[in-house]
Image: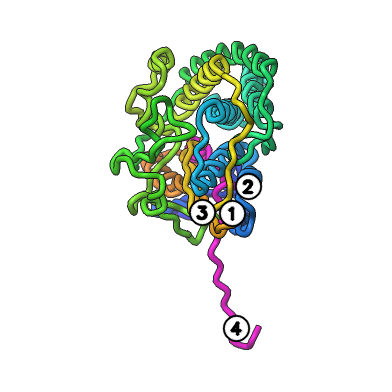
Amino acid sequence: MSHRTERLLTVGALARVEGEGALRIRVRDGEVTDVRLDIYEPPRYFEALLRGRRHTEPPDLTARICGICPVAYQMTACQAVEDACGVRVDGPLAELRRLLYCGEWIESHTLHVYLLHAPDFLHLPDALALARTDPALLARGLRLKKAGNEIVETLGGRAIHPVNVRVGGFHRLPERAELDWLTRLLEQARTDAEDTLDWVAGFDFPDLTVRHELLALSGTAGYAIDSGTPTGTRTGPFPVPEFTDRVREHQVPHSTALHATLSGRPHLTGPLARWHLNAAQLPEDIRALAARAGLEPGCANPFRSILIRAVEVLWAVAEAQRIIEQYRRPPAPAVPVPARAGTGHAATEAPRGLLYHQYELDRDGLVRRAVIVPPTAQNQGAIEADLRAFVQPRLHLDDEELTRRCEQAIRNYDPCISCAAHFLTLHVEGRGDGS
């Protein structure tokens, strides 16, 4: 506290989030006047790195954007390139892609639930403290995460930055024995996922209501993950090729990650948005378990997003079981995707929310332009606004406790800062003396 009428809450390095960022909140005369997520991680220029590359390369290159959700980047890149080349992958190959995506949802959400966010609700400093207080509980989380990792490794060739994915499909198809092994793992994972949901349901959730428009893929027969139509809770559905007309990125002075708005206003993508738009698409038994856990259909409290992630883990396990049970080996691991000039668009649901890719190819299949809009870039403005709403009625708390709760609130959104810090407009001004 700098003096009687002004408070400054700061966190120099946010913990238990992916990437490098800081928090700064200023309170003056009892009013929150400024909230900033200062993202200081160096921008990574992936869109520029893709220029001049062959149309077959984006899946491998974009996987390196994130070590936690590389599958999301690979799947979206593949679909955008295929769209530019006039190719659609469907049938068993598309189902294998969905299975791979389920693996990533399981391991990413489980990582967040057990290691990043649960310690806040348990009043523990970190997951190491959880390991000391309840090793069996943490062992369950690691076992569940391992099931997701095994799916990604089996389909993708390795658990981090998979190497078996290619435009048109895969380099290699899994053997039946490999899928049978996954089936056995998923039987235990189903039990672990149900127990995880019951455990998370017992947490104490602070009150906060999101007022932003929510954006997610929707309109598919099942729960939207690898395809769908971008749909806003207010704006309604719009075609994927119109994404950058509706969602506009812009730079702010305090962040190396871009912010974004939907129709000119902050919006939120991710678990809350998917739950609002697609809960009815979940299987009946999973909806019943979600209801038992206290997750209401119109939930708008971001602190309860950990509950939605637990439900999505359970769904991803069940969906993986369904795909493996119904799997029929395709005649080839991939379909041809010949190069041609064109612009392709695709959107999928990364664990943290809607992810969009656009590629412009020349007639030789070289990338002339790339646009990647990650979910965390879309969420940053909403996070800052939600923090303002969260802090204002809690100004009676001392600085240490209020700062701790603000960090917990940020972790509601599971921000992936490295994914978002991917572009920066640089203006260089000389001194007028030729230097």
Mark whose residue sits in front, 3 or 2: 2
Camera-near label (2 vs 4) is: 2
Residue 176 vertical position relative to residue 71 in the rendered view, above or below: above
Label 2 – label 4 distance at C-alpha: 44 Å
Q: Which residues are magenta?
A: 406-435
The residue singled out by tag 4 in the image is 431
Give the amino acid at mark 1: Gly
Residue 275 picture location, percent across and down: 39, 29
Amino acid on which disc 3 is placed: Val
Q: For residue 56, which numbered disc appears in the image?
A: 2
Task: Work out whether mark 1 precedes mark 3 in sequence or the reverse, and give the earlier one.
Answer: 1
Separation of residues labelled 1 and 4 (CA atoms): 42 Å
| Sequence-first disc among 4 and 3 | 3
Q: Earlier in the sequence, mark 1 or mark 4?
A: 1
Sooner in the amino-acid sequence: mark 2 or mark 4? 2
Q: Which residue is mark 1?
A: 365
Q: Which residue is mark 3?
A: 371
Left or right of 327 in this view: 233: left
- The quarter of the displayed image where residue 383 is located: top left
x then y, percent, for residue 279: 38, 25
Question: Is 36 within the magenta?
Answer: no
Q: What's the magenta bit mostly, secondary-structure-wise?
A: loop
Graded by Cα atoms within 10 Å as few (under 14), some (14 to 19) or many (20 or more), the crowding at tag 1 reads many
